[in-house]
């Protein structure tokens, strides 16, 4: 059985689509997995690890108002992150991820492990979220898995 990232690469290459990424809590893990596939330069335009509010605003065009109103770990922020990455890289679609990897940083309504994912395409924008129960490393890995699965779900639905 082929890996999620290989399947994604085959879809993107087949349709001539370019992918961009905007990562926060995963720290580049999604990009690492995408670029583990030989020939990924055919479809991977690039990615940004925007950890701070300032980086999200400066590099991805996330609104300060959105960050103040909803925080970095929110549906609104990941949608803006994904749109910003898609535009910045001239890509056809982009995935974003922002979450609380732990062990600290959790708060009421946003516990450790709480993570949002955004997907922006020319057809529209979508988001989903999960809450992981692992340690920091496990939460980051689960978030990278979920980001790739979100993209694969979209590509399979569009096939």
Image (cartoon, rainbow, N blue to C red):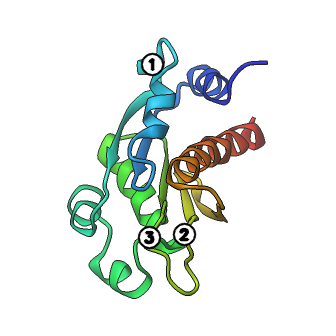
Disc 3 from disc 2: Cα separation: 7 Å
Residue 80 at x, y = what percent? 41, 65
Residue at 45% of width from left, 49% of height from top?
Answer: 26
Residue at 55% of width from left, 78% of height from top?
Answer: 110
Given residues 98 and 76, the one toward you in this image is 98
Comparing labels 2 and 1, the label whose residue is closer to the camera: 2
Q: What element carries label 1?
A: helix
Label whose residue precedes the other's in the sequence (3 or 2): 3
Residue 154 at x, y = what percent? 69, 45
Residue at 56% of width from left, 44% of height from top?
Answer: 141
Label whose residue precedes the other's in the sequence (1 or 3): 1
Q: Which residue is under mark 2?
A: 112
- What quarter of the picture does the C terminus occupy? top right
Is residue 24 toward the left or the right of residue 58 in the image?
right
Q: Residues within 10 Å of mark 1 (few under 14, many from 20)?
A: some
The disc label shown at residue 151, or none: none
Q: Which residue is under mark 3?
A: 104
Q: Is mark 2 on a helix, strand or loop?
A: loop
Residue at 61% of width from left, 28% of height from top?
Answer: 5
Disc 3 to disc 2: CB gap under 8 Å:
yes
Q: Which residue is under mark 1?
A: 42
Disc 2 from disc 1: Cα separation: 36 Å
């Amino acid at each position: 059985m082929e890996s999620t990232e290989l399947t994604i690469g085959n879809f993107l290459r087949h349709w001539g689509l370019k992918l961009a990424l905007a990562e926060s809590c995963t720290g580049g893990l999604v990009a690492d997995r995408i670029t583990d596939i030989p020939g990924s330069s055919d479809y991977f335009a690039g990615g940004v690890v925007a950890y701070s509010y300032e980086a999200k605003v400066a590099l991805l065009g996330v609104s300060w108002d959105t960050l103040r109103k909803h925080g970095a770990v929110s549906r609104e922020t990941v949608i803006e992150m994904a749109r910003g990455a898609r535009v910045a890289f001239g890509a056809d679609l982009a995935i974003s991820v922002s979450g609380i990897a732990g062990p600290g940083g959790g708060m009421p309504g946003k516990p450790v492990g709480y993570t949002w994912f955004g997907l922006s395409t020319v057809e529209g924008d979508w988001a989903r979220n999960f809450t992981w129960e692992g340690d920091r490393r496990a939460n980051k890995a689960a978030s990278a898995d979920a980001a790739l699965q979100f993209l694969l779900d979209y590509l399979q639905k569009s096939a």
